[in-house]
Amino acid sequence: MEHVRVHPRFLHSNATSHKWSLGAFAELLDNSLDEVSNGATFVNIDMLENKKDGSRMLLFQDDGGGMSPEKIRHCMSLGYSAKSKVKNAIGQYGNGFKTSTMRLGADVLVFSRSCSNEERSLTQSIGMLSYTFLKSTGKDDIIVPMIDYEKRQAWNRKVRTTLGDWYTSLQTIIQWSPYSNEAELLQEFSAINEQGTRIVIYNLWEDEQGQLELDFDADVNDIQIRGVNRDEKSSLMAKQFPNSKHFFTYRHSLRTYASILYLRVPYDFRMILRGKEIEHHNIINDMMLKNQVTYKPVMSNGYPNDTDMVANVTVGFVKDAKHHVPIQGFNVYHRNRLIKPFWRVWTLPGSQGRGIIGVLEVNFVEPAHDKQDFERTNSLSRLEARLILMQKKYWSENCHRIGYGGNRAKKSSGTRDTGSSPEDTPHTVPSLYRPSKSCEKSNYLQISQDAEILHSGSNHKIRKTRMSPLDMSTQFSSRQMAQQTAEKSAKTVKSARSVRRSLSYISDDSDTEIAGTASRPIYNIINTPERTFNNTSFHLLPSNGVTRTERMTTRSKSKEETVKNNGDGGTIEDPETIIKQLKDENSSLKERMLKMEESILKELQAEQEKNKCLLERAENAQAQLETAKKALEALKNAFSEEIRRREQEEQDLRNKLKEASCTIQDLTEQLSAAARRNCRRKS
């Protein structure tokens, strides 16, 4: 049957999905870490020298299970992945090896030794994926030369088709690889013990200046990237602030990036870079003032699709945040693998959010094929919105603790946050001139129990607390009483500003007195010349130069007189009437609160019933899903078994066909020989 060809140019264009070369390194590290289940204990990354031209090459080696001849062909194929059936495996798409190796260099050689059950013997294979070979020879299809060996008593060539094809593949590998003969190729297996894989990437890519994209000289124990990802400022800040060095260097340093690439690393697995082990680092250890939040996304139907849809977020300030370093972002992992390093979700300019970092693992959002970002889905959008809220809340509650300004910073450390506006912050109102001694000795007007006027020299400070609706209503009635009982004054002064939330009066300079109830002494209120409230103004009687006796006489007279309130002719109300009105208002408020409480309880009960019903539906759906998963798994196993059986039958038929061809050829030769003998006899 006809098949679709893949042009060699696709190798290069497919590799450009890795815009960042360290992302290609991460793909190969993923493959080695996945081999832990097959016994891998290390992965070694190093630099080699090409003996043919002296150029530099990259080496990746691990001691995992290796690849059989069949598996190495799957590895070189596009889109094939046996890991898609393996739980918790990082690789899933069957494209990482091709894109990563072609992103780092034009050519790659794979040496792999395996003791797999399917071959029932020890095998070793060599495969070459060479863009240089395909481009130079003008191939219009991707051809991958491969040779295999198997060990009986000694290593023998393992022929899959014909011996001629085997030698053709060998000569192609020798011509287009850094090795000059078969002996040098086999020498590479001496670095592999019983099993493992050794990958050599050569003809590394260069930048526009003709230099290698990878820098092996800046640090003998590291591999770095040249260009915009590396600048002197970041390097200096990494040395100055060691707790933040991973943020400043992960973009250009493979050692730094690999140290935070995995959230958890198996205890007996080591990553070695140029002869020195990479120390695993958890970003949480760089935090202070840590806070943990559990995020459970809820779908539009009211309950999560999967009980495992949960993310534990650890957020805090980096330990160098007190120096106001420009660092922030969340490290988002998927199945233990870092997908988005230092993801900046809060992008407002300025210092807001600076110094806040976080770590979380989300397994319910699918990563993109290059594993450097997530697929743009509704789940990712909701996660991003929630992370923004988390960072904003954490900033508003803790920014003052590292020296940043804000409403929280203006308050004392022991003050409880009530979510008030800037108008609620304590402030001081200056006095125009010093009040008289009689004013200092008199009682102060307290319109509500939550506000009190504090005299300190010539300044007055207002301390305010949050008031209940009932206190505000009482304060409002008291203020009306004060307005209605104020007397006319021959002298008026200008109005002063009132404080909105506490509804208390501020006295600037002199004592004023108003007509009040008989049971209370002289009250002090602010010396506002004319105060407007609800379209009602009143004048205040100045007290400067008036003796206490005169004020008492004026107060007693004022109780018997009718006082006009801004020309409206209002009369003084009896205090008992006012108290009665306040009690009636209080009773009315209590009744309304009781009714609201009953209504809320009914709504809560209804929501609880609805929640219970939804939970039952969720449990039923989960049970059905588990049943369907088991059925699907059984069906997959049946299909896999059938495919293996048919492949085995096909292989047997091919062997029989091959034997039949040989038999036919032998018979044909015998027939020809017999015919020749008959001809001789006749002659």
Image (cartoon, rainbow, N blue to C red):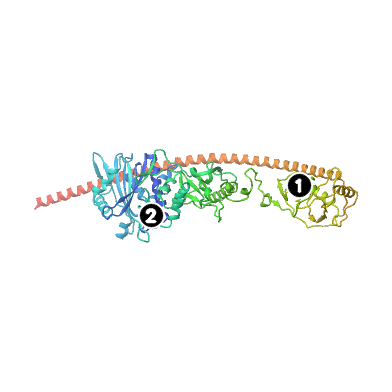
At label 2, counting other C-alpha atoms closer than 10 Å, the crowd grade (few under 14, some 14-19, many 20 or more) is many
Where is mark 2, residue-wise? 103
Residue 657, given in percent of the width and then of the height, sits at 28, 47
Mark number displayed over residue 129: none
Where is mark 1, residue-wise? 472
Whether residue 580 is visible to the viewer of this picture, yes or no, is yes
Residue 535 vs residue 49: left or right? right
**Which amino acid type is marked by label 1?**
Met
In which quadrant of the rendered image does the N terminus lie? bottom left
- Please name the residue shown 85% across and 45% down the image: 517
Q: Nearer the viewer, mark 2 or mark 1?
A: 1
Whether residue 313 is visible to the viewer of this picture, yes or no, is no
Quadrant in the picture for residue 192: top left
Residue 388, given in percent of the width and then of the height, sits at 56, 50
**Which amino acid type is marked by label 2?**
Arg
Residue 516 vs residue 654: left or right? right
Residue 170 vs residue 556: left or right? left
Residue 346, given in percent of the width and then of the height, sits at 55, 52
Q: Nearer the viewer, residue 70 or 492?
A: 492
Helix, strand or loop status at disc 2: helix
Residue 472 vs residue 196: left or right? right
Q: CA distance from mark 2 to mark 1?
A: 70 Å
